[in-house]
Image (tube, rainbow, N blue to C red):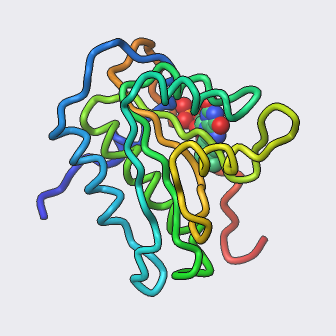
Amino acid sequence: MDKINFNHLILNRRSIRRYTAQELSADDVKLVLEAGLLAPTSQNSHPWHFIVIDDKEMLQRMSEVRTMGAGPVARCAVAIVVAADTTLSDVWVEDCSIAASYMQLQAAALGLGSCWIQIRGRFGADNIPAEEQLMDMLGIPEHVNIECIITLGYKDEERKPLDPSKTLWEKVHIDRW
Ligand SMILES: Cc1cc2nc3c(=O)[nH]c(=O)nc-3n(C[C@H](O)[C@H](O)[C@H](O)COP(=O)(O)O)c2cc1C
């Protein structure tokens, strides 16, 4: 493999929460999904499922499953719900997290904006779990749990790249804590 500047991608990936009205190309969406499908999983179990939504009305409803923090879902062009068949893996949370991160990095590499919207362990109005509401809306079966939503869209906000001088090197412990 030729050397690629992965560090550049890492520094330039930021959470983007505002998107233009421009639609995404099917090729770009496919590449993002492919990144998730090629992510490593424990015991090669591939427990995840990715539900792709671009219907504006549905995106609006999905953004309301949490009282705050899910606003980008209403504004994005495409949302990918990252879920997993929990009968296939006891570490589905890790598997979903890696796939979601891969998809965010692929989105960044394509110049798209994306944001992770947490669903697992989050609640909406009347303390109803966000997951429960999405399961109903999207017809997700009982043996499947939802981890997060990854929003995608062309950026409508500028975020500065991460500053390497602020890297938290104090979190690294050499030889022992
Ligand atoms: C596990 C996880 C959960 C997150 N949940 C949300 C969320 O619900 N809503 C949101 O707007 N951003 C969410 N984010 C994005 C973080 O706020 C963001 O990654 C962090 O502030 C660092 O900013 P950056 O991604 O631009 O570097 C989440 C990120 C992670 C990794």
- Residue closer to the observer: 109 or 28: 28
Q: Position of residue 91 (x, y in %)?
A: 60, 76
**Which residue is at 32% across, 21% downward?**
154
Location of residue 26 with respect to 44 vertically, above or below: above
Residue 82 horizontal side relative to residue 177, left or right: left
Between 142 and 79, the one lying in front of the other is 142
Q: Is residue 37 above or below residue 27?
A: below
The x, y position of residue 4, in whole percent, is 21, 51
Horizontal side of residue 71 vs 32, given as left or right: right
Query: Considering depth in this image, is 99 or 24 the residue closer to the camera?
Result: 24
Report whether residue 168 is seen. Answer: no
The quarter in which the C terminus is drawn is bottom right
Residue at image location 37% in from the left, 19% down from the top: 155
* Residue at the left extreme, as displayed: 2
**The N terminus: image quadrant:** bottom left
Q: Give the image quarter of residue 90.
A: bottom right
The extreme right residue here reads 126
- Ligand 1 appears in which quadrant? top right
For image coordinates 18% across by 31% down, the residue present is 25
User: Which percent across, then down, holds residue 104?
Assistant: 41, 44
